[in-house]
Image (cartoon, rainbow, N blue to C red):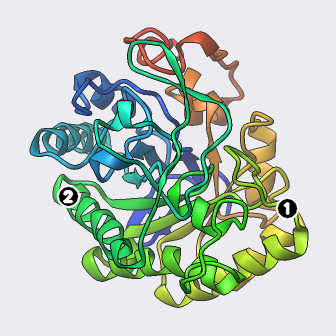
Amino acid sequence: MSLFSPTTVGDVDVRNRVSLAPMTRLRADANGVPGPIVAKYYAQRAGIGLLVTEGVFPSAESRAYPGQPGIVTDAQAAGWAKVADAVHAEGGTVFMQLMNGGRVTHPDITGTDRIVAPSAIAIEGETRLADGTKVAYATPHALETDELATVRDEFVAAARKAVDAGFDGVELHGANGYLLHEFLSPASNQRTDGYGGSPEARARFVIEVAEAVVAEIGAGRVGIRISPAHNIQDVWEKDDAETRATYEALIAGLAPLGLAYLSVLHADPAGELIQDLRRAFGGTVIVNTGFSSITTRDEAVSAVDEGIADLVAVGRPAIANPDLVTRWQNGADENQVDQPTVYGGDERGYTDYPFLQG
């Protein structure tokens, strides 16, 4: 087993053990439709074993950012079908990440009269609107118990649309401070209705969403991403014992489902917490070191060689090097990311990074 050897992830075979980390790029149009440039971007990177798209919103009120793509309307689904076709034409495999932004948004972004979260606790700070102006984060509507099924079913409908559009599967975004992650943290979840208050209760909604999506499209087409103790966007997980208990409860509920994979974003993937969760999960695990450091070729090779993970998710190097796997296999130099063009814009910093010559 090596980073460059093929493997099976759920119901699909992948050509190597490198995964494209889901990264916000914000190149959809004002209606959340991914256009030809998005198809080109993912197709360029089809040499990576498992592509995971940027977070895609499953409902209008779950849209986190201007320029973020959705999977709600027929036009959005048609745009994504072209993405899937383009990736498959290059022999690639692609999962769509489904992301409810929760409170990490604003009604002026969603176009709805509210945004939602486990509890009515706003994020401190500001977000940016489509015209570039900044506004304070709004206080979210605390979802009523009987509203949870609607949010769950939005994930289910989005998963069905993704598979019908030709995607190989979906990844549930339970990380980075968005809605599902908000349920996991006592800082953002102060519910008293059986969906908060204890580790098991905080994990309950995430498990229910996963169960429902599995029932719709099959476990082998469903992955989930988590980021324990990421401490981002006011989703604080600073009590080590409580964090461990919460994620152990989550994995205890997910493991019996037989998901395609568990993707974990953590600064220390070889550490005790993540390796304990890996063993408890019992299936394919993808690791990603996160925003603080860029994963190097040697680190990725070692993670697989040493049995730390089954696949390694790579972010910024894959932005700047569409042929990243080829470069890594040949020990070639890498392009560097142009940071100002990461979020939004046109083809610059998106589809214009050079490939190896010859």
In the displayed structure, 297 sits above or below 183; it is above
Distance CA(mark 1)–CA(mark 2):
36 Å
N-terminal label among 1 and 2: 2
Who is closer to the viewer here, 214 or 116?
116
Quadrant, the N terminus: bottom right
Amino acid type at mark 1: Ala
Please give the residue where the numbered disc 2 appears in the rendered image. Answer: 161
Give how far across and how far down residue 84 sits, in percent: 25, 44
Q: Residue at x 55, y 52 (%)?
A: 178
Please give the residue where the numbered disc 1 appears in the rendered image. Answer: 270
Q: Few, some or many C-alpha atoms within 10 Å of disc 1 (few <14, some 14-19, many ≥20)? A: some
In the displayed structure, 167 sits above or below 43; it is below
Residue 225 in sight from this viewpoint:
no
Q: Residue at x 51, y 73 (%)?
A: 206
Q: Nearer the viewer, mark 1 or mark 2?
A: 2
Specify whether 286 is left or right of 65.
Answer: right
Which quadrant holds residue 346? top left
**Can you name the residue that lies furthest to the left here?**
74
Q: Which of the labelled discs sits on residue 42, or is there none?
A: none
Specify whether 265 is left or right of 70.
Answer: right
Who is closer to the viewer here, 131 or 333?
131
Q: Element under label 2?
A: helix
Q: Few, some or many C-alpha atoms within 10 Å of disc 2 (few <14, some 14-19, many ≥20)? A: many
Q: Residue at x 78, y 67 (%)?
A: 307
Who is closer to the viewer here, 42 or 243?
243
| Disc 1 and disc 2 in contact, CB within 8 angstroms | no
In the displayed structure, 79 sits above or below 149; it is above
Amino acid type at mark 2: Lys
